[in-house]
Image (spheres, rainbow, N blue to C red):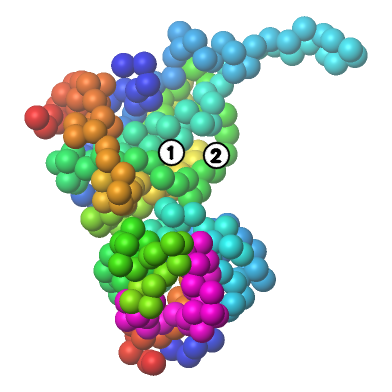
Amino acid sequence: MRWMWIDRIVELEPRRRLVAIKNISLAEEHLHDHFAARPALDGRPARPALPIMPASLIIEGMAQTAGILVGHAEEFREKVILAKIGRAEFDRDVTPGLTLRYTATIQQIDKVGASTAGLVELLDLSDPARAAAEIGRIDLMFSHIDQNMAGLDFPEHNFVFGEGFKTLLRMSGIAVPG
Amino acid sequence: MTRDAIFEKVRDVLVDALAVDHDEVTPTATLTGDLGAESIDFLDIVFKLEQAFGFKIAQGELFPENVSQDPEYVREGKVTAKGIATLKERMPHADFSEFEKDPQIGKVAEIFTVDAIVRFVERKLGRA
């Protein structure tokens, strides 16, 4: 379950839209290296620790959100692989104690793949209005690899949607295939 | 829609899909050689053309598939006469005159030019 970058699916409209959340916790190891405190050195002042969620992992969270939506559309028969990041824009840092909300929408889907548009929002419990703030956009493309890699054989079983994803689906109240 | 208007829209699609500059997208530019397209970009281009022009493009309609793997079509690194005939039939929007002079399989990507896409769109819109 280590490579799961969403915690729960909160909405699913099959073949159209999926919403998932990710709570950012200071217990996550990577936040202690990204970025660690730096002592004063060679005339540069010391810098305190700055734990922020790496943008690459925010993209991975959206890829998992959108990937589940695309996989669900074909009942997880296809091996859905992230093929292209068309756009990834972020307006601010994401720090521990906040919740990311990913909304992925299918733009186009056919036999060989899909494109998705993604909205990243931030939920802050300390905000009296409790309003979600838009902080980024991530547009992705997915390939159904069995349909695209002519002449190449992949394992029969669907290695994309493994146990981690099945647990996530089940814990979110979504029917798990097979 | 005029040919120039089609070209403008195709150019916007390619600028968006391939992250290239407007002035790099000339009619003779090749998608892979000049504009750096990789395999997944072809699917992206198909999706974006469908959105831009409002028609559906069948798999293999714009960029034919399963030609290079067929020994009838490719022999000793060259596309056979039968292979070229098949490509021409599947891609009436492309210009094969240069490729036919030296039909090495490694050069087949050179027939995928910006102009080939523009002509493909023209045909789809029923203008050519």
Residue pushed farthest right? A43
What's the amino acid at mark 1?
A: Val
**Residue A3, position in %: x, y?**
37, 21
Q: Which range is magenta? A: B84-111
Residue pushed farthest front? B76
- Neighbours of disc 2 within 10 Å: few (<14), some (14-19), many (20+): some
Residue matched to label 1: A120
Please, what is the dominant secondary structure of the magenta stretch?
helix
SS type, badge 1? strand
Q: Check if mark 2 and mark 1 are on a common chain.
A: yes
Q: Kindly check if marks 2 and 1 are in contact, taking CB atoms under 8 A apart as contact.
A: yes
Assess whether residue B105 is covered by the magenta stretch. yes
SS type, badge 2? strand
Residue matched to label 2: A90
**Residue A1, position in %: x, y?**
31, 16
Name the chain letter of the residue that bears numbered label 1: A
Assess whether residue B21 is covered by the magenta stretch. no
